[in-house]
Image: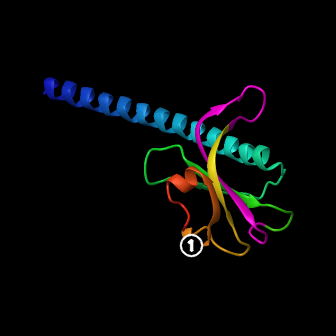
Amino acid sequence: MSDLWRIETTVLALVGVLLAVAVVNDVGRQVHVNERLTADLHTWQLYTGHDYHLLSLEQDYTGHSTREVVCGNTSPGQAGTRTQVCLVVTGPVIGERSGPGRRAARGGYYLPPHRPDLRRYRYACFGTAVERELCLH
């Protein structure tokens, strides 16, 4: 009977350690994702020269990449009511210590006003957006 108790205790302890490691890993990953998304917004502001805060951000959920698309108006107005420029940002966050970091904008495209971010509405693609065929030709 005492051997069974030791085995059960050992198994429970191992399950507890496994759960603790999973929680720490998940929290750490979420912190890095949040830092990356903040850097994406800052990157859009730096590249476009606009200090807009109503931006849309789309994460790549199809894989384990760090590719995101950040879209915002090219002129003042409610989000999506003006022509939008969308940047494809990738890579690590750079320059975190001196304020919000930034990431590399590898390409992008434009969207007309009042249109969802669908491939058929995208135009004037540049950089990796052309290579990955994110726009219609």
Q: Is residue 97 above or below residue 48?
A: above
Q: Which residue sits furthest bottom?
A: 114
In the image, 86 versus 95, the foreground residue is: 86
Percent position of residue 43, x then y: 72, 43
Q: Which residues are magenta?
A: 79-102
Q: Is residue 55 above or below residue 115?
A: above
Does residue 134 appear to the left or right of 103 in the view shown? left
Q: Which residue sits furthest right?
A: 76
Residue underneath mark 1: 120
Q: Quadrant of the C terminus?
A: bottom right
> In the figure, residue 6 lies in which quadrant?
top left
- Note whether residue 59 is visible: no
Residue shown at 77% from the left, 59% from the top? 54
Dot 1: few (<14), some (14–19), or many (≥20) neighbours within 10 Å? few
> In the figure, residue 99 lies in which quadrant?
top right
Percent position of residue 74, x then y: 80, 61
Q: Quadrant of the N terminus?
A: top left
In the image, 39 versus 4, the foreground residue is: 39
Does 95 lie within the magenta span?
yes
Percent position of residue 72, x then y: 74, 59
Does 106 lie within the magenta span?
no
Percent position of residue 17, x then y: 37, 29
Does residue 11 appear to the left or right of 30 in the view shown? left
Q: How many marks?
A: 1
Residue type at tag 1: Arg
- Note whether residue 39 is visible: yes
Badge 1 element: helix
Residue shown at 53% from the left, 43% from the top? 66
Does residue 5 appear to the left or right of 34 in the view shown? left
